Amino acid sequence: MANKGRTFELDTVHDIVVDTDQRFVHAAVPDHSGNARDTYYDLEVIWPQDYHGHCHGAFIELKKRSGDEGKRVSVMSGGNDDETGKEELERLIEGTPNWGDAYVCIKFDHREIIVLHAEYLLKRLEGDVGGFDDAWSTITKAEEKTHGARLTPSDSISMVKPCLSYWESSTAGLDDHRKILYETGVPDHCIQPFELDSAEAATA
């Protein structure tokens, strides 16, 4: 499972590199060196915020999960044996620099990827979302109910795998890396436009 997760991370960062302007966007996965505590995230995407050399970054924890639609699945259970899912989330938030934002991205099988702002997710789990602007978070109130993130008795984090009646499939929805770029706020001018297929190009 760990190897599959690492492959997902490397594939995602490769797709981001291909589909962004490398003069402006830096994307990479950290070197874990076999220790989950060596780092607090799986993927970083950094881009210029202004013309004065200031940058903004998204520091992302990627989770790939499978399960039955509409059923609850554990999505964060800790980076090592003595860490809970909530502590893993807190470590991600605390390690993120003040010029960046932390995100948790959940990829259920056959579903478009879910992108959650980590601080908003933690506030939801703790029952306190006061003061958070929904426009700032990457989830709407409807999605807030349907994904149903909650803490288990052991402080793991579980979510409900979305049904196709309200969430796109992986084929109908955006590619994983595109959804991450848009939801984390990478500027449009830094993202390569979609390539038209031959039929679309003929009618363009």
Image: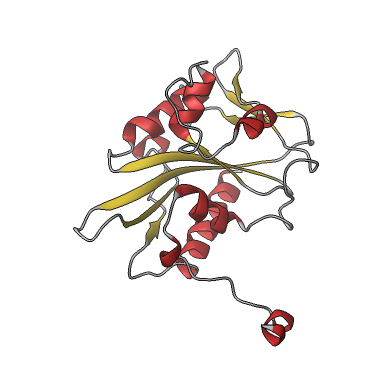
| Image height of 49 relative to 66, above or below | below
**Residue drawn 53% across and 57% down?**
12
Question: Which of the 4 image quadrants contains residue 107?
Answer: top right
Q: Locate residue 8, reporting x and y percent.
A: 57, 53
Number of numbered tags placed on the structure image: 0
Q: Position of residue 191 (x, y in %)?
A: 46, 65
Q: Nearer the viewer, residue 6 or 184?
A: 184
Quarter of the image containing the C terminus?
bottom right
Q: Determine which quarter of the picture holds residue 196.
A: bottom right
Q: Is residue 147 left or right of residue 87?
A: right
Question: Residue sitting at 52 percent across and 64 percent down?
Answer: 15
Query: With respect to residue 27, does 76 lie above or below?
Result: above
Viewer-side residue, 67 vs 118:
118
Apparent side of residue 65 relative to residue 29 in the rendered image (left or right):
right
**Image location of residue 91, percent across then percent down:** 38, 29
In this rendering, would 55 be left or right of 5? left
Q: Is residue 58 above or below residue 191?
A: above
Q: Is residue 86 visible?
A: yes
Name the residue at the bottom extreme.
202
Quarter the N terminus occupies: top right
Q: Considering only vertical position in the picture, is 70 above or below 204? A: above
Q: Front-most of 82 and 188?
A: 188
**Residue at screen point 40% across, 57% down:** 28
Q: Residue at x 42, y 37 (%)?
A: 36
Outermost top residue: 153
Query: Whole-percent x and y of residue 117?
Result: 48, 37
Farthest residue in the left direction?
52
Decide if residue 81 is in sight here. Answer: no
Task: Give the image's coloring scheme.
Answer: secondary structure
